[in-house]
Image: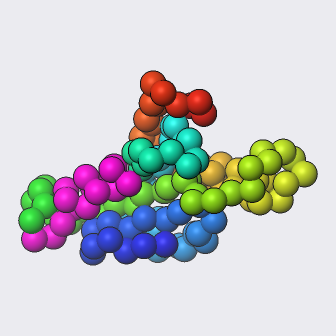
């Protein structure tokens, strides 16, 4: 979990849910995740939200709003996406739980992705 500024919090795959997060506008990041690829669109989205929600320099329309970004991307994962891989099962459970809690889902599908 990473508190970017007073208006923006990012949770990553595996981070636990806290009741206080229910008060945020929750955005789940869905779409292409090609592990090992250099283009990390999730970080680009988070950087844009960081600028938008900055209490001093951001858009004043969002000064009183709190956003929670749910980012399923992991740096390294056991590459075996099978039902007998507990790491994979836990990640999928986290993703399904976050999707159910999300107020909005932002999807990005890269043309060059092998894993849309």
* Colouring: rainbow
Q: Position of residue 31 (x, y in %)?
A: 51, 37
Q: Is residue 93 above or below residue 41?
A: below
Q: Is residue 64 visible?
A: yes
Q: Quadrant of residue 49?
A: bottom left
Q: Main secondary structure of the magenta part?
A: helix
Q: Quadrant of residue 18?
A: bottom right
Question: Image point 28% across, 68% down: which residue?
Answer: 7
Residue 36 lies left or right of residue 85; in this view the side is left
Question: Image point 63% across, 51% down: which residue?
Answer: 95
Residue 4 lies left or right of residue 52; in this view the side is right
From the viewer's side, name the closer residue of 34 and 28: 34
From the viewer's side, name the closer residue of 41 and 23: 41
Is 66 in the magenta? no
From the viewer's side, name the closer residue of 78 and 10: 78
Question: Image point 32% across, 71% down: which residue?
Answer: 4
Q: Is residue 62 visible?
A: no
Q: How many marks?
A: 0
Residue 51 lies left or right of residue 82; in this view the side is left
Q: Which residues are magenta?
A: 43-56
Q: Position of residue 51 (x, y in %)?
A: 19, 59
From the viewer's side, name the closer residue of 102 and 45: 45
Q: Position of residue 5 (x, y in %)?
A: 27, 73
Is 53 in the magenta? yes
Quadrant (top left/top right/bottom left/bottom right) for the C terminus: top right
Q: Quadrant of residue 111?
A: top left
Q: Is residue 101 above or below residue 17?
A: above
The residue at the far right in this view is: 84
């Amino acid at each position: 979990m990473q508190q970017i500024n007073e208006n923006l919090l990012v949770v990553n795959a595996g981070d636990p849910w806290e009741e206080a997060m229910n008060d945020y506008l929750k955005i789940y990041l869905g779409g292409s995740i090609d592990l090992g690829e250099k283009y990390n669109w999730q970080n680009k989205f988070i950087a844009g939200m960081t600028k938008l929600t900055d209490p001093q320099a951001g858009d004043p329309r969002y000064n009183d709003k709190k956003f929670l970004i749910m980012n399923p991307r992991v740096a390294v994962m056991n590459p075996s996406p099978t039902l007998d891989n507990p790491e994979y099962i836990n990640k999928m459970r986290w993703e399904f739980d976050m999707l159910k809690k999300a107020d909005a889902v932002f999807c990005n599908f890269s043309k060059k992705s092998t894993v849309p």
